[in-house]
Amino acid sequence: MRNFFLIFFVCSCVFIRIDDSVDLGHGYRYIQDAPQVIIYNTSPKSKATGKIIIPPVVKSYAFNDRYIIAKSQGVDENTGNSEGKPIYYWIIDKAKKGYSVPPLDSVAFYKVLKIKDIHLGF
C-alpha cells in the first residue's frame, strides 16, 4: 500500500507545470521554454501568455528599469531549425507598454544604443 502512494505521488508530479518565465519588468517576460520569446503579458491568470514582442529564438537579453535589449535568431517555420538563419537585434522601451518594435541589424542596434545612451550589453 505504501508503494502505491509513493508511485502515485511521483507520477502525479510529472503533470505539475510551474511558471519559469523571467520577469523583465513593466509586464514584459522572457519565456524560457522552446521557442524562447519575449512577451508583453496581457493575462491576469497566466504570467506566461501574452503578445509576442520578440519572436523565436531569443539567444540573449539584458534589461534595466527602462529598456530591454535582445538578440534573436530566425527559425525555419517548417523544421524549427535556426542554423544559417539571420541574427536580429531589438531595443524595447518599456514605457511603450506592449508596442511592437522592428528588428535591427548589428550596426543600427549599436548606433541606437549609443544615441539613446543605453548602457546595456550582452
Image (spheres, grey):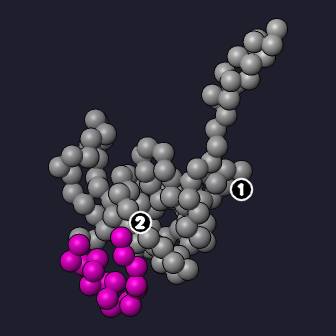
In this rendering, the answer to whether 14 lies above or below 22 is above
Residue 83 picture location, percent across and down: 21, 46
Residue 8 badge: none
Residues in magenta, as a range: 106-122
Q: Is residue 68 left or right of residue 106?
A: right
Q: Quadrant of the C terminus?
A: bottom left
- Point out the frontmost of discs 2 and 1: 2
Residue 102 picture location, percent across and down: 35, 69
Name the amino acid type tagged 2: Tyr
Look at the image and say whether residue 99 sits in the magenta stretch.
Answer: no
Where, by quadrant of the figure, is residue 70 drawn? bottom left
Q: Quadrant of the N terminus?
A: top right
Seen at 61% across and 71% down, the residue is 26
Where, by quadrant of the figure, is residue 78 drawn? top left
Q: Is residue 119 left or right of residue 108?
A: right
Asked if disc 2 and disc 1 are in contact, CB closer than 8 Å, the reply is no
Seen at 71% across and 56% down, the residue is 44
Q: Is residue 103 at all visible to an observer of this figure?
A: no
Name the amino acid type tagged 1: Pro
- Between 43 and 60, the residue placed more toward the observer is 60
Q: Callout 1: 10 Å neighbours few (<14), some, many (20+)?
A: few
Q: Residue furthest right?
A: 1
Distance of mark 2 from mark 1, alpha carbons? 24 Å
Q: Callout 2: 10 Å neighbours few (<14), some, many (20+)?
A: some
Seen at 38% across and 90% down, the residue is 117
Residue 27 picture location, percent across and down: 61, 66
| Residue that carries the numbered disc 2 in the rendered image | 61
Query: At numbered mark 1, what does the secondary structure look like: helix, strand or loop?
Result: loop
Query: At numbered mark 2, what does the secondary structure look like: helix, strand or loop?
Result: strand
| Residue that carries the numbered disc 1 in the rendered image | 44
In this rendering, the answer to whether 67 lies above or below 44 is below
- Between 62 and 6, the residue placed more toward the observer is 6
